[in-house]
Structure formats: structure tokens, C-alpha cells
Amino acid sequence: MNIHNSCKSAIQSCLDTRTFAAAHLYNDEKTMSIHIHDCYEIYYSISGGKQFLIDNRFYDFRPGDIFFINQYESHYLSQIDYVTHERIVLSIYPDYLKRFSTEQTDLNYCFTYRDTAFGHKLSLSSEERKRFLYYMHKLSEKKEFGQDILDQAAFLELMTFLNRIFLVRCEEDQALEISREEKTGGAHSGQIDAILSYVNQNLTEELTIQKLSAHFYLSSSYLCKIFKDETGTTINRYITAKRISRAKALLAEGYSVMETYAMCGFQDYSNFLKAFTKAVGISPKKYAMYEQ
């Protein structure tokens, strides 16, 4: 298969063939601004350092790190040091993976499952890095008989390998979370569960810290403290994130932008536009166009 020297050409090839494409980048190709597209992407760092912004969350991108980007997740790659950033990028058409998935093996899992502390990023061990590059080297540019089948086999081996690592990390992350809960005794878990449930059921209402404090008979400072301790984020950030997620779902279902912001609890359109664009990377109107 052809190994591209540009992310843009790899993405276009992926979309044209509805399979997958690979790019091996040695230079500092001018990165696209915050963008989304219809394919999955895997980024693997070989050398140098970058910073990734994915759906409004920043990650360091160092040698041995690998990122899984779902379709329509906004992302942006920026420079954080002066070393040439060598990396491999795989663009994958989602339906192509679904064709080879089974009831026992979901090859989309590493792109679609996000209920983990590590989110989109994995840091590969030395042995895992060697295995990753081994499979990439099997994707040959030779034009020999049967090479297309061998490329497909190598790609499926690679995706099986990566999903196995992802599953192991998920299990380790869940075990760590259980250990933390056992150590803390879940002191505030019941209160936080009640607060989260209330927020999720009342997203269209005006949700302020003062109103939540009054509803749960807690002081504002105590409410903010236990919420941050248990969830790792603030109440206002959580509410905004839930409203943005709800907005994305409504836009994907065909609701207009004006209908959507009112159904998500934003008090006025300007606040909705600012919050959505900051979180997703594009305006609600453009996002709705991509989802059509």
C-alpha cells in the first residue's frame, strides 16, 4: 500500500477507498486548525514532542504515546518543543472495521469506549512499541501479487493488538478506581450520585451552585469541595459538558441550532455559541452540517 507523507492525503485516500491509509511524517507538516472528519485516526509518536487538544482536553504527546481519535471528535496538534516530530498516522474508515468485527471482538472499541481516566491516550511500553512498528513495517509499498491481502491481514493484526492493550488498560484503570473507592470508603459517593442524577434530569432548568446548595441543604463551599474531590472537576464545568453533549446529540438528530440551545438549558444563544465552539472546536451550525 502507499505510505503517504501528508495527513491530508492519507485522510482523503481513506475516505475515497473506504478502507484505511497510513502516513509516516518526518517533517513539520503545517497542521490543520481544529478540525473534525468522518474517519477514525490513530496517532503514534516516534520522536519529538507535541501537544494534543481533543474535544477541549489537552494531552502531552511524547515518544511512545498513541492516541485514538473517534470520528467527529475535534482535535488539534501543536508544537511544544523544537525537535522534529516524527509520527505515524493511520486513518481508518469506521465501517471498514465493523466489517471485520464479531460478537466477541469489537475492533472499534478503542475508538468508542471512553469511560476511563486515560481517555484517548495510551503510553506504550518498549515491547509494545516494537510490536506496533513491526505491524507497520508489514504494510509494504511493494506491488507484488497478493500484497493487498497481506496489507489487510497486517492491519487487522495491528488493530487486534491495539484493542487488546486498550482492554488491559481499561481493566487496570477500573481496578485502580475500585482501590481508590475502598481506601476513601466512598465518604461522599451517595451525595455526589444524588447531585449528578439531579443535574442530568434537570439540564433544561437554571442550575446554579446556589440553587443546588439550597436543594441539597449544603453550603456552597462544601458542595463545591466534595464535588471536586469525588469527580475531579467543578460543578459548572460538569453542567456545561453535559449540556454540550446533549446539544451534539440533538444536532445529530436534526434539530435546528435555535431549538437545540433552548433544549439544553442555555439561557441565551450567545452563551451557547461560545461554550459549544470552545468545547467542540467548531460552531453548532458547522457541526450540524457535518452530521447531516
Image: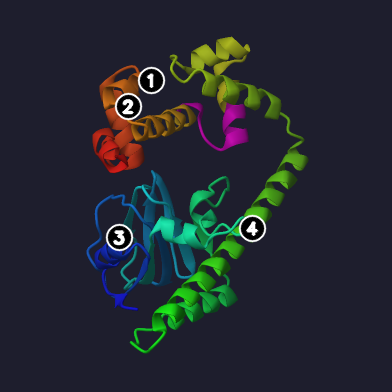
Nearest the eye: 190 or 242: 242
Instruction: Read off the residue under disc 2.
Output: 255
Indicate the amino acid at tag 4: Gln
Disc 2 marks a residue whose amino acid type is Tyr
Q: Residue 267 is drawn in which quadrant?
A: top left
The residue tagged 1 is: 263
Q: Which residue is mark 3?
A: 15
Q: Which residues are magenta?
A: 225-236
Q: Left or right: where does residue 173 sit relative to residue 76? A: right
Dot 1 falls on a residue whose secondary structure is helix
* Residue occupying the point 41% across, 33% down: 249
Identify whether 213 is placed above or below 290.
above
- Single out the mark in the foreground, 3 or 1: 3
Query: Counting residues from the N terminus, which is met first, the one under dot 3 or under dot 2?
Result: 3
Describe the element under mark 4 as helix, strand or loop: loop
CB contact under 8 Å: marks 2 and 1: yes
Q: Secondary structure at mark 2?
A: loop
Whole-angstrom CA distance, mark 2 to mark 1, is 10 Å
Q: How many marks?
A: 4
Q: Earlier in the sequence, mark 1 or mark 4?
A: 4
User: Within 10 angstroms of label 2, few (less than 14), some, or many (20 or more) residues?
Assistant: some
